Amino acid sequence: MASDLSVIEGAKLLMVGAGGIGCELLKTLALSGFKDIHIIDMDTIEVSNLNRQFLFRQSHVGQSKAKVARDAVVRFRPQISITPYHANVKDPDFNVDFFKQFNVVLNGLDNLDARRHVNRLCLAADVPLVESGTTGFLGQVTVHAKGKTECYECQPKPSPKTYPVCTITSTPSKFVHCIVWAKDLLFAKMFGDKNQENDLNVRTSDAASSSEHAEDVFESKKDEDIEQYGRRIYDHVFGYNIEVALSNEETWKNRNRPRPVYVRDVLATELIQQNGNVDKDLVAGDPLSVSAMASLGLKNPQDVWSLMENSRIFLEALKLFFLKRQKEIGNLSFDKDDQLAVEFVTAAANIRAASFGIPLHSLFEAKGIAGNIVHAVATTNAIIAGLIVIEAIKVLRKDTSNYRMTYCLEHPSRKMLLMPVEPFEPNKSCYVCSETPLSLEINTKRSKLRDFVEKVVKAKLGMNLPLIMHGQVLLYEVGDDLDEDMVANYEANLEKLLSELPSPVTGGTILTVEDLQQELTCNINVKHREDFDEEKEPDGMILSGWTQPPAAEKDGKESMGNGASTSSASQAIPLETIGDDDIEIVPVVTEGVAPERKRKLSDTSNAVTSDLSSVEHGTSSKKKPQEIDDDSDVVMLEDGDSGISKKKRLR
Ligand SMILES: Nc1ncnc2c1ncn2[C@@H]1O[C@H](COP(=O)(O)OP(=O)(O)OP(=O)(O)O)[C@@H](O)[C@H]1O
Ligand SMILES: [Zn+2]
């Protein structure tokens, strides 16, 4: 077998992501002797990266991560060839041929979407992938080699944490419920896309009437100045809406009744009038530097503000959005790095929390919850980067039998902080690596092609440049090289009902969906179904054949949800995907019946820890590693004298 050094020196690697894991990884690769490394990262450096992404300095803020990382490493290893791409890995340039030039691909990403995309390209190009993720003290590294191990998507990832609509709109009991309300409902309503559906005013009792009423409330009135508008919104959402909710006695039988809050009760008249000083401390031209805290003279983000202070911040932030960031209104979505947005959401969540008797939180804490931030631990990233390099070397040596998935735990389990597990075989029912057909129940007489494209092809199947065929008839296609007539034709198809397409899609139809970039083809058996439960099946369609496992919590003991699967190993949450958009609000039939998902910073780590039950093999119950019985069906490795771990099946 070739020596490690010769395989290392002869290898050509692709790294995707030059963030927390990526910086550590590039350094470790360089110090391990790798000589030809390509890096893709679409981001520029932010101040908040500097504490752990140690290749970057203050002076690099705003520059490409991939390029700066390269320059930093070339300074201490000038003989290495590092090729940076400041680009999205989903760009069509990074096609299968591009991937084929590499011996192994190493992911240091932070979102599911990009990870799935890279997984597909690696499968199509037949290049092994070493995948990784960290959350705080927890981390994992997995190896994916086509036909030999599971692919990254062999086990569907847990769905986002969900909350019943009623909890968010009417009966919050935890601070996170107030944050979700402030961020996904109020902020979205005030500053986001007006055409988006929004449950802000949905209440169990008078949903229809109140949402009609609400249409006008959020529009500013003709002769109203911004201060009056802000106070009216305040009184509506924290006062009037609570009064309306209180009028439904049933809701409050077993709950604490909330208290309506009006501006006049919280702020003295003179404060209402001279709230803030808009022009103070503003750096002209940079909208992201606008801050309600600065204009009110509040400095410490770790302070818990009083109800009065939160109310002042709320009114001030609202005013600043309208005065200083008017152009963005209608297009904003919450961003944890947007100071004014964080201030608005913190204040709104706190006022609501006060109204419901829930403890208030500081801006720092609120930002963590709203941005789903588990504070990154540089050491975890360094450990994970080391493990990636170890697996990459095994891949290059084709040492298949020694591939390991390794979990980095927060607390030792069986005296181990690093838990190596044998990779599992490909899942035969995986639609990605085994091309197993899927089934779709849908009302073909009521659903449009657009619904299918958005909800199934893009959201569920993660396709980027899809093409949809029924037999030989092309129903839809995306691409730069289409002529105008075709584009118009496809656009028209999108608006047609499935059963009225040029080649009608009805029960029994097999649709072929293909992504030309990912070189992934998927056949979907369509089953016509008349009715869907609007609450339980809000998409109005059900895709099956590749079952979504239940979310990872529920005491960590639910079934794996994929009976056909041979393993539960890759069940582990793709850790860094606990990101941007993993909170979702779902309607439920009866309040309190649907399991209420927890969402606290600490819960995230619990969820992940319980998910590390991946050390179990082929069983349906999940336990935390700490709880594994000796007789459980566990694959573990013991330290052997040889220094190389031997596999041991605990039975
Ligand atoms: N589709 C993509 N194409 C290219 N790079 C991507 C893509 N998606 C994510 N990345 C990169 O992956 C890296 C992930 O790094 P990390 O998890 O440390 O996130 P971060 O954005 O640097 O930090 P934080 O989110 O904690 O502020 C980021 O640099 C990001 O730009
Ligand atoms: Zn697979």
Image: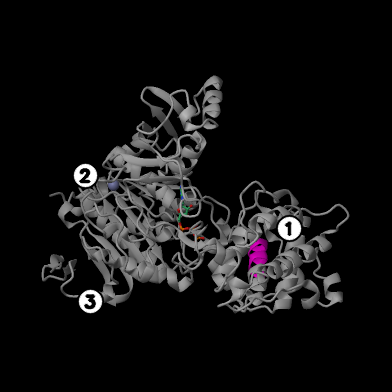
Of residues 115 and 608, the one nearer the viewer is 608
Using residue 317 as the reference point, say whether residue 588 is left or right of it. Answer: left
Which amino acid does the dot numbered 1 rest on? Phe
Q: Which residue is mark 1?
A: 321
Residue 188 drawn above or below residue 269: above
Q: Which residue is mark 2?
A: 147
Which amino acid does the dot numbered 2 rest on? Gly
Q: Main secondary structure of the magenta part?
A: helix
Query: Does 546 appear in magenta?
Result: no
Q: Residue at x 22, y 63 (%)?
A: 619
Graded by Cα atoms within 10 Å as few (under 14), some (14 to 19) or many (20 or more), the crowding at tag 2 reads: some
Q: How many marks?
A: 3
Secondary structure beneath label 2: loop
Secondary structure beneath label 3: loop
Which amino acid does the dot numbered 3 rest on? Arg
**Real-space CA distance between mark 2 and mark 1, rounded to the nearest whole angstrom:** 53 Å
Of residues 423 and 474, the one nearer the viewer is 474
Of residues 610 and 385, the one nearer the viewer is 610
Q: Which residues are magenta?
A: 339-347
Q: Which residue is mark 3?
A: 414
Q: How far from the left and from the top, in percent, is residue 603?
A: 44, 71
